[in-house]
Image (tube, rainbow, N blue to C red):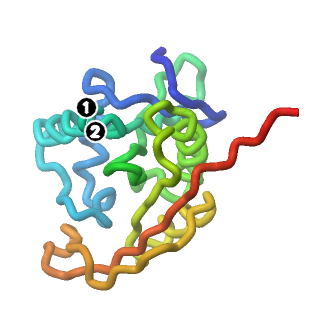
Amino acid sequence: MAAFAAESSRLCLQTLNIEEHLESYHWLMSNEMSMIWSMRNPTASISESLENMRNHRPTPEKPWNERWGIMLKGEREDEKPKMIGVVGIVREAELGYRIHPDFWGKGYMSEALTMFLEMWWALEVSQKYSRLVAAADPENLASTRILIKHGFVKSEYKKDYYARAYLGGEVKSDLEYFYLDRPIAREKV
């Protein structure tokens, strides 16, 4: 079994890599409901998903550009975890996440975000940032709730700001920004 960046009783986070995750990534990114809140259309082919994955790797110019697969553990110990979503930094100091609709409403995204935030603040690449931002369509109540639950604070509201691909790219939707300050390190007693 591959090494995991973070782990809970039900989930683990694993750095996305083409060899292990391409098919699952395509399953996620080609699903219309997975992409309902996105400016991007679902991927139409596995080669498009592959190109997308290649663009989500850290580079010297974008050392923060990385995604982790949200892996659901199997019921048996010998079962390989299944990728059900992704979480990572989509733009400098901006959190992004997506989970397949088959797994909505089960608490997986909240669990994954808890692990991710703890992991992110400990990574060397995050040390120069004092806060993370996230954006959500205010109609996406699940996403806004999860951000608030994890300590994100509402910040800026942009009216008619982005074109959702799901709506044909012609209808502008609102976008709400949130921020989360770096946790204050507590000295161990």
Percent position (x, y) of residue 65? Answer: 32, 40
Q: Which percent across, then down, holds residue 97?
A: 41, 51
Mark 1 neighbour density, 10 Å: few (under 14) some (14–19) many (20 or more): few
Instruction: Give whichever of 37, 95 is nearer the camera.
Output: 95
For residue 62, the mark is: 2
- In this picture, is 101 found above or below 142? above
Please name the residue shown 68% across and 48% down the image.
184
Quadrant for the C terminus in the image = top right
> Does the residue at mark 2 contact the one at mark 1 (Cβ under 8 Å)?
yes
Q: Pointer 2: residues within 10 angstroms few (<14), some, or many (20+)? A: few
Q: Disc 2 versus disc 1: distance between alpha carbons?
A: 5 Å
User: Going by the picture, which residue comes out furthest to the right?
Assistant: 189
Residue drawn 34% across and 49% down? 92
Which quarter of the figure has residue 36?
Answer: bottom left
Q: Secondary structure at mark 1?
A: loop
Tell how many labels: 2
Query: Which of the pair 135/87 is nearer the observer?
Result: 135
Q: Amino acid at mark 2?
A: Lys
- The answer to which of 182 and 142 lies nearer the viewer is 182
